[in-house]
Image (cartoon, rainbow, N blue to C red):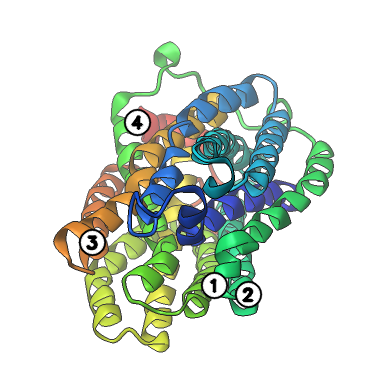
């Protein structure tokens, strides 16, 4: 768990740090004459990183199915480390002109490729390592590390915002956050090299699919669920920028919101994963989708009408906890419904495509919608539409849990996937 999580933590930390420092990065890499402060261009650069995620899912994910999960995770981790260091060292627009945003985009493309190749092998590795009746807990803990990365990024941002003047944060302070992430790369590579592979050692046996193809219906429903999961994730992650840009709160208060998110998300993901091992994945997902659908608009209304620290933090805590239930169960339900021989690549591609098309555009779209409509509730309505789509897909999917309503193992998830989820 530690070896898998350290890589995932770094890669999510990197993506979150870019989102949290979107304003400062925009001011560094884009001239202010292009926009009022470069934020839209910075968010567009954030979204560009999602373009190469499907390619990473195809190349590294399929590599994990052929050679092994461990080798694939080493490649994705190394590429992410190189990209994060390059981004930290890239000079500003004032120093090297148009080369600055070009390098920024290039490193974002590498980051997207690496993250797209990380998700499939890492989730597959834990599913194949876990006892069948503990898969929910294992994957829930992995998803919890996503928020640990969010928490670390938020703490780093909070400390930097509290310690530096705004001009210092704009000039060089944000780079410290990326240097901190790059510093753990050698340790992560060393730890991951010691992992035994699960591809050829797993006892899971799955009947071959007819024609060795995954039915289009399963792919479409999976993409709809990933749509909801990624949009909800990046709406919650956008709250740091939203608090500064829309609610006009101080940077230190805004980074405190990431700490709230980082505390609530892992608790909910771990508990939700453990509960799903007893009652199934769909009941936990239903709870997350239903409650988030009902509460999103009221919570955003409360934040816009009473933009105090307590209201913002309380709203984010609720949204973060519910989003954790959705994200962990979507990833678990899809991945354990896939056969062993193609799990890493198939899940990596499905998740990367969904994240690239829908998640990568989320923050740019909601900022554009706020500017276009003048309504601070635009993110809430955008998220609501995504939840409706994802919830409908969830209801149409079969239960994937190998153990339902009991604590001990029954059928393997692969067998259940073939008989119920895929066919």
Please give left or right for residue 186 compared with residue 21 in the image. right
Q: Earlier in the sequence, mark 1 or mark 3?
A: 1
How packed mark 3 is, by other alpha carbons closer than 10 Å (few <14, some 14-19, many 20 or more), is: some
Q: Which residue is mark 3?
A: 370
Q: Secondary structure at mark 4?
A: helix
* Residue highlighted by disc 1: 166
User: Where 239 sits versus 415, above or below?
Assistant: below
Q: Position of residue 86 (x, y in %)?
A: 66, 41
Name the mark on residue 164. Answer: 2
Query: Residue beneath label 4, please?
Result: 219
Q: Residues within 10 Å of mark 1 (few under 14, many from 20)?
A: some
Disc sitting over residue 278 in the figure:
none
Quarter of the rendering occupied by the C terminus: top left
3D distance between C-alphas at marks 1 and 3: 25 Å
Alpha carbon separation for disc pair 2 and 3: 29 Å
Q: Considering only order in the chain, which callout, 4 or 1, is on the residue closer to the N terminus?
A: 1
Q: Are marks 1 and 3 in contact (CB under 8 Å)?
A: no
Discs 2, 1 touching: Cβ within 8 Å? yes
Count how many numbered circles sit on residues in the image. 4
N-terminal of the pair, mark 3 or mark 4, is 4
Q: CA distance from mark 2 to mark 4?
A: 47 Å
Q: Find the distance from the CA under tag 1 to the CA under tag 4.
A: 46 Å
Q: Is residue 228 visible?
A: no
What residue lies at 57% left-to-right and 41% top-to-bottom? 96
């Amino acid at each position: 768990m530690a070896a898998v999580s350290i890589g995932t933590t770094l890669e999510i930390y990197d993506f979150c740090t870019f989102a949290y420092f979107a304003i400062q990065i925009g001011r560094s890499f884009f001239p202010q004459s292009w926009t009022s402060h470069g934020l839209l261009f910075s968010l567009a650069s954030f979204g560009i990183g999602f373009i190469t995620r499907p390619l990473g899912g195809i190349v590294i994910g399929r590599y994990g199915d052929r050679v092994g999960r461990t080798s694939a995770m080493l490649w994705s981790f190394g590429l992410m480390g190189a990209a994060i260091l390059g981004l930290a060292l890239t000079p500003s627009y004032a120093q090297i002109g148009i080369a600055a945003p070009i390098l920024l985009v290039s490193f974002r493309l590498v980051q997207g490729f690496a993250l797209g190749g990380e998700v499939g092998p890492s989730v597959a590795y834990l599913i194949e390592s876990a006892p069948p009746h503990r898969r929910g807990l294992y994957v829930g803990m992995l998803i919890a590390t996503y928020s640990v990365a969010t928490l670390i990024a938020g703490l780093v941002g909070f400390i930097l915002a509290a310690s530096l003047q705004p001009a210092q944060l704009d000039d060089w302070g944000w780079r410290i956050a990326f240097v901190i992430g790059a510093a753990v790369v050698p340790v992560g590579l060393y730890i991951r090299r010691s992992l035994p592979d699960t591809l050829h050692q797993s006892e899971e046996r799955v009947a071959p699919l007819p024609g060795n193809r995954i039915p289009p219906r399963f792919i479409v429903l999976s993409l709809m669920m990933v749509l909801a999961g990624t949009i909800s994730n990046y709406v919650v992650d956008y709250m740091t920028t939203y608090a500064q840009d829309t609610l006009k709160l101080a940077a230190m208060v805004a980074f405190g919101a990431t700490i709230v998110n980082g505390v609530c998300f892992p608790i909910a993901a771990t508990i939700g994963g453990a509960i799903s091992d007893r009652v199934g994945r769909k009941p936990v997902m239903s709870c997350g989708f239903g409650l988030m659908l009902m509460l999103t608009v009221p919570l955003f209304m409360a934040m816009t009408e009473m933009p105090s620290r307590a209201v913002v933090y309380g709203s984010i805590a609720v949204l973060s906890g519910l989003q954790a239930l959705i994200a962990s169960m979507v990833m678990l339900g899809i991945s354990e419904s896939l056969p062993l021989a193609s799990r890493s690549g198939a899940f990596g591609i499905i998740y990367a495509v969904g994240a690239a098309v829908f998640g990568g555009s989320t923050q740019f779209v909601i900022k554009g919608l706020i500017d276009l409509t003048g309504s601070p509730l635009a993110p809430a309505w955008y998220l609501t539409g995504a939840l409706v789509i994802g919830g409908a897909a969830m209801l149409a999917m079969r239960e994937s849990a190998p153990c339902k309503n009991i604590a001990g193992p029954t059928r393997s998830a692969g067998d259940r996937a073939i008989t119920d989820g895929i066919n």
